[in-house]
Amino acid sequence: MTTTTNGPGEGRHPMTGNAMSGEARGGMERHTYDVVVVGAGGAGLRAAIAAHDAGARTAIVCKSLLGKAHTVMAEGGIAAAMGNRWPEDNWEVHFRDTMRGGKMLNNWRMAQLHAQEAPERVQELEDWGALFDRTEDGLISQRDFGGHKYARLAHVGDRTGLEMIRTLQQRAVSLGIDVFMECTVTDVFKDGGRVSGAFAYWRESGRFIVFDAPSVILATGGIGKSFKVTSNSWEYTGDGHALAMRAGASLINMEFVQFHPTGMVWPPSVKGLLVTESVRGDGGILKNSEGERFMFDYIPEFFRAETADTVEEADAWYEDKKNNRRPPELLPRDEVARAINSEIKAGRGTPHGGIYLDIASRRSPEFIRKRLPSMYHQFKELADVDITAEPMEIGPTCHYVMGGVEVDADTQESAVTGLYAVGECSGGMHGSNRLGGNSLGDLLVFGKRAGEHASTYAASLGDARPQVDEADVKAAQESALAPFEVEGGENPYSIQSDLQQSMNDLVGIIRTRTELEESLGEIEAFKERARTMVVEGHRQYNPGWHLALDLRNMLVVSECIAKAALAREESRGGHTRDDFPGPDPAWGTKNLVVTLDAAGTGVELHEKTLPEMPDELKGYFA
């Protein structure tokens, strides 16, 4: 399975990553697999399990520690039409909700597969040991979330993502799948038009690794660290997006960035940290500084048929579950985030620049501590706020990107043979806006599909596997070491800080042509500064070097977002143009696709007509 080329006395255990030598510029490791999965969140783990079960020699490569995936932050639940709370719920309704939430820009086939297969994936998790909350009848409990017609989120308190990672991680380890922790992939190799492997380095020692593998699955998550205020942690620098582009794949829907309505705004050290939608799903309401429950002023006509029209009706909804009207706090995330942003801009915000989320006046302390244990402890320990007795200060935070690698709906393969993408770094499933709870189902459904197809493809090659070109290995090594060769250049931290501020100010929740054009000019300047950024010291334990390599990815992804946002002259889903305030039917039939230009230094934009939905599925929207 694994062959290693080491310097004297050097080597590394693939699970622990512990160095056996302190030599910074020692030999290069080499490993051979059928499938290499980049990323160890829900999508990566599920893909690796599927590939292994299909007979492939499989490895997981993760930038951080195993178990520290962003899937853990998906607290609310897994959207799946299991019908445990509402027997009339089914995949057709879930499909329709997903398409409507995405403003019909979704890849319909991906939305269909997700709705059909999510219940089986949830049941599979339970079979593997996941401990879900139960209904009175002993079935898996399901809670309400924004944009879903029925309560359909299977959950474990407000720690569902953590339970998913625990379950998948335990299964992957028990299967004996090799895991390379604290290891960053910087390049995907090709032989002709086919994937031949990947290039990576150990973050601890800086030592390089070559993976010989005909199938690479990207499961690297999102792009949030391009923005100053984000729920995302340090790993989310758009690595998979950029790796795919440099390999020749395209990205789709990159203008659509989801700003979660509720992130912490105080204290500054936790600004942007996610406050789960479960708070609103379990009865929390939004108020401005004047004490008004303002969401009733922002209900779009499209949703009024399924939303309570008065405060009294919303209150009654909690008491009478047979009344299928919904409180306005459970509108899709883009609608809620824009409403909150409008209240803050109108001067009705809280002292720290947010608004209030109040569940204390709606639920008993015992209910809150039982249903929302993580939120209770998070606010108590980080902000000294008791959410059972007082409201939370929250505001929009960059949370999720709907855009990602353009893939085949059934296989998750990109335009590059042997290169697959799943989870947040793939695009198409969510259209212009993702419904809460659809992310965890997405990881499971398409992780399984990608792993199976990647394994099948690798097996079909027999002995005719693509080969890694040694010239490409040398070029990847030189590129990674380039920041050490510069003298008198700029610190990468200052470039990252300026990029994050620029994206926050100019490509944020509300956009205009002038600001987007300004942002593209600033990104070009950042790219120029990055060409001469310098890293001090050596390769061991060097976070400045890690950031310098990450920054390359952040810059190309930021350019993709800004350029697509400038081109789409309408407001739809996670993309709001102040100068084009409403949706334009002409834009409702096409996606924007971005690729690298021939020189590999800039981004090219293309329009692509949406795939035609079958008449059978169109009937669900009549």
Image (spheres, rainbow, N blue to C red):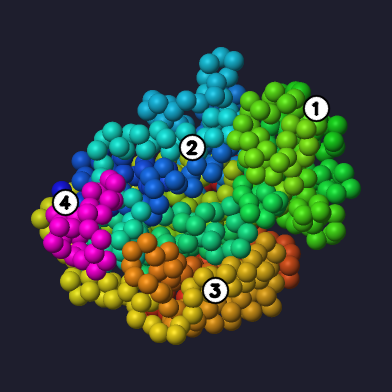
Badge 1 crowding class, 10 Å Cα cut-off, few under 14, some 14 to 19, many 20 or more, is some
Disc 3 marks which amino acid? Ser
Residue corresponding to mark 2: 162
Location of residue 442 in the rendering, given as x and y in whole percent from the top left corner:
47, 44
Please name the residue that numbered disc 3 is placed on.
494
Of the two numbered discs 1 and 3 in the rendering, the one whose residue sits closer to the viewer: 3
Instruction: Write down the residue under mark 4.
Output: 2
> Front-most of 124 and 370?
370
Q: Which mark is residue 295?
A: none
> Residue 141, image x and y in percent?
56, 25
Q: Which residues are magenta?
A: 3-29
Residue drawn at x 80%, y 27% as measured from the top left = 316
Inter-mark Cα distance, 4 to 3: 40 Å
- Residue 316 numbered tag: 1
Nearer the viewer's eye, disc 4 or disc 1?
4
Residue 26 falls in which quadrant of the image? bottom left
Q: Nearer the viewer, residue 591 or 432?
A: 432
Q: Toward which corner of the image does residue 183 lie, by quadrant? A: bottom left
- Taking the view exactly as shown, the residue that stands out farthest to the bottom is 488
